Amino acid sequence: MKITFVNIFLFFAFSQANAQTAGEVVDSFFEALNSKNHELLNELCLDDMKIHTLAIGEEIEVSSQSKQEFVDGIKSIPNETKIFEKIRSEESIVNEHLAQYMLPYSFYVDDKLSHSGTNVMTLLKTKEGWKISYIADTRKKS
């Protein structure tokens, strides 16, 4: 009887973990970012995820990062440094296996506005559930 109960419990627990919607994955991404939870960030993204950034100033500079570079960057933030990315609004297009989100944001470091811009995130529904495959963002210093 115990084995049956444990199996049923594990089945539902596993089903719930994979039952996240694309929107829940996006929300989890920002919760993980704000808490500097690099392990969860790593889990939420495809291994070959890419990030492109447009730094908007006198000139526009384009840079890119791999998932590993992004995760390592979050890991390198000192514990005493507080970061917070506030999403101001959300637009999304979601179908059965593909989702895209446009998310204007403001980014704070130690409660001071650092920069603002817009994130565009693309997610794919894999056999493991929704995963972030691509992020593009703009950054304008405040």
Image (cartoon, grey):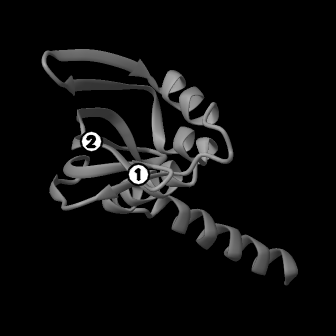
Spot occupied by residue 86 in the image (x, y as percentages of width and height):
34, 58
Q: For residue 2, what is the image quadrant?
A: bottom right
Q: Which numbered disc covers residue 78? A: none
Residue at the image point whose x is 25% and y is 41% from the top = 142
Spot occupied by residue 54 in the image (x, y as percentages of width and height):
21, 24
Q: Nearer the viewer, residue 119 or 24?
A: 119
Q: Please tell me how crowded label 1 is: few (under 14), some (14-19), or many (20+) other residues with Cα within 10 Å.
A: few
Q: Quadrant of the N terminus?
A: bottom right
The Cα atoms of the two marked residues, 2 and 1, are separated by: 25 Å
Residue at the image point whose x is 54% and y is 62% from the top = 17
Mark 2 secondary-structure assignment: strand
Mark 1 secondary-structure assignment: strand
Seen in the picture, residue 13 relative to 29 is either above or below; the reply is below
The label nearer to you, 2 versus 1, is 1
Residue bearing the label numbered 2: 121
Spot occupied by residue 41 in the image (x, y as percentages of width and height):
53, 43
Count how many numbered circles sit on residues in the image: 2
Task: Check if mark 2's residue and mark 1's residue have beta carbons within 8 Å.
Answer: no
Residue bearing the label numbered 1: 112
- Please name the amino acid that badge 2 sits on: Met
- Please name the amino acid that badge 1 sits on: Lys
Q: Nearer the viewer, residue 6 or 18?
A: 18
